[in-house]
């Protein structure tokens, strides 16, 4: 009994101290589950692009980028969307946002005309602002550490709540009962209790994965102690007088090196000695948008310089690969996304019912 009273008090003060942040994180997380669709809906100009259209060649896309942005000589990352339509492109080191930790230039190209139909820097438009608020509280790298630590505290809050509620032997029926017509304090408790019970598993998974994603520099060394992790190769090419091969040729060579996957991203060289990286989504990978299947090629002679096949990953790499798809529900398709979306609303319900009940009880005790 004494332990349960202590745990309840801990749960109360954790809720009062980080509950509002938990609610904010959940609500922003729900938005981000479908942020690409929301972002597209907020920019109707993208809807004018022919649905399902695809470019005639990826080299033509790259040439169009170089024409549109001739001063940007670094690497471009071209996204290959499963359904076609506008082509999202990222340029990771724009001079305009050099002082910010992560603020790439984002472009969208019409796949037929190859003209730029939308542009903006990450963080300067609504959905990416929400993303930075959710991930780093708009505080860049220090904010990620704060959110990682807060995630651990939120996990303690969830576990303490379950512990404080957990029924004694023979008490399950009473603990699960919903008392109709009870006083306000009891009704609020029932709402708080059932919201926590119903969402506990998903909220714990989302909270754990979120904290791990926020603290990669702390998590990776711990995982690496038990399982070796993949280290991206440091590669360089030697410029040739004949110039680089067309991207489409390099993509075909990459497909032969790692067959059976769906093309996901093409990353062009960062400079004259850079290499091309082609990403595929192989069957069984938990993330279609950000897969771990990579082929690195020499842009001049087309040689395959390195391959990462996630089917050969260590247990530690598999764990890290699953973090983001579990966090946003992508690992389980549309059902998983909706499950995470709904779970993101629950912390707000928990916070409101918990604080409301605390105030009702405090007024009753004072009266």
Image (spheres, rainbow, N blue to C red):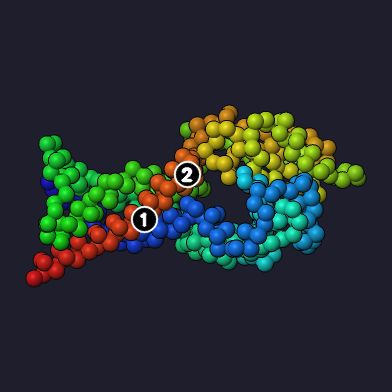
User: At which x and y percent is residue 22?
Assistant: 36, 57
SS of the residue under disc 2: helix
Q: In the drawing, does residue 109 fall left or right of residue 28?
A: right
Q: Quadrant of the C terminus?
A: bottom left
Position above or below: 262 against 88: above
Residue at the outermost left position: 367
How would you rate the neighbour count of disc 1 (Cα within 10 Å): few for under 14, some for 14-19, many for 20 or more?
many
Is residue 323 something that shows in the picture? no
Residue at x 57%, y 65% (from the top left corner): 125
SS of the residue under disc 1: helix
Comparing labels 2 and 1, the label whose residue is closer to the camera: 2
Residue at x 77%, y 46% (from the top left corner): 57
User: At which x and y percent is residue 87?
Assistant: 67, 52
User: At which x and y percent is residue 176?
Assistant: 18, 44
Is residue 131 something that shows in the picture? yes
- Please tell me the numbered disc located at residue 334: 2
- Please tell me the numbered disc located at residue 158: none
User: At which x and y percent is residue 359?
Assistant: 19, 66
Residue at the outermost bottom position: 367
Residue at x 79%, y 39% (from the top left corner): 249
Which of the marked residues, 2 or 1, is nearer the chain's N terminus?
A: 2
Residue at the outermost right position: 241
- The residues bearing labels 2 and 1 have C-alpha atoms spaced at a distance of 17 Å
Q: Are marks 2 and 1 in contact (CB under 8 Å)?
A: no
Q: In the drawing, does residue 210 fall left or right of residue 180?
A: right
Q: How many marks?
A: 2
Q: In the drawing, does residue 250 fall left or right of residue 185?
A: right
Position above or below: 361 against 74: below
- Please tell me the numbered disc located at residue 345: 1
């Amino acid at each position: 009994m004494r332990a349960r009273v202590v745990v309840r008090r801990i749960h109360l003060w954790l809720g009062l101290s980080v509950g509002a942040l938990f609610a904010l994180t959940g609500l922003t997380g729900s938005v981000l589950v479908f942020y690409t669709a929301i972002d597209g809906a907020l920019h109707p100009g993208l809807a004018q692009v022919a649905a399902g259209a695809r470019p005639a060649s990826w080299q033509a896309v790259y040439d169009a980028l170089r024409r549109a942005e001739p001063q940007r000589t670094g690497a471009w990352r071209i996204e290959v969307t499963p359904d076609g339509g506008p082509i999202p492109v990222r340029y990771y080191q724009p001079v305009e946002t050099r002082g910010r930790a992560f603020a790439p230039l984002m472009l969208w190209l019409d796949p037929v005309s190859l003209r730029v139909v939308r542009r903006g820097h990450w963080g300067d438009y609504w959905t990416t602002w929400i993303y930075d608020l959710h991930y780093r509280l708009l505080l860049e790298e220090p904010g990620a550490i704060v959110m990682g630590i807060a995630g651990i505290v939120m996990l303690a809050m969830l576990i303490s709540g379950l512990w404080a509620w957990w029924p004694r032997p023979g008490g399950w029926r009473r603990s699960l009962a919903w008392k109709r017509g009870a006083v306000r304090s009891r009704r609020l408790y029932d709402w708080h209790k059932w919201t926590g019970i119903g969402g506990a598993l998903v909220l714990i998974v989302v909270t754990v994965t979120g904290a791990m994603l926020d603290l990669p520099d702390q998590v990776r060394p711990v995982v690496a102690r038990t399982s070796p992790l993949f280290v991206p190769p440091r590669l360089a090419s030697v410029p040739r007088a004949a110039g680089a091969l067309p991207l489409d040729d390099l993509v075909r060579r990459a497909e032969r090196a790692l067959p059976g996957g769906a093309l996901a991203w093409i990353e062009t060289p960062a400079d004259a000695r850079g290499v091309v990286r082609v990403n595929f989504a192989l069957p069984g990978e938990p993330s279609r948008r950000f897969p771990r299947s990579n082929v690195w090629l020499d842009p001049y002679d087309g040689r395959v310089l390195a391959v990462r096949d996630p089917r050969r990953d260590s247990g530690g790499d598999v764990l890290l690969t699953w973090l983001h798809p579990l966090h946003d529900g992508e690992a389980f398709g549309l059902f998983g996304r909706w499950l995470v979306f709904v779970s993101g609303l629950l912390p707000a319900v928990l916070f409101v019912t918990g604080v409301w009940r605390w105030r009702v009880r405090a007024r009753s005790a004072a009266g």
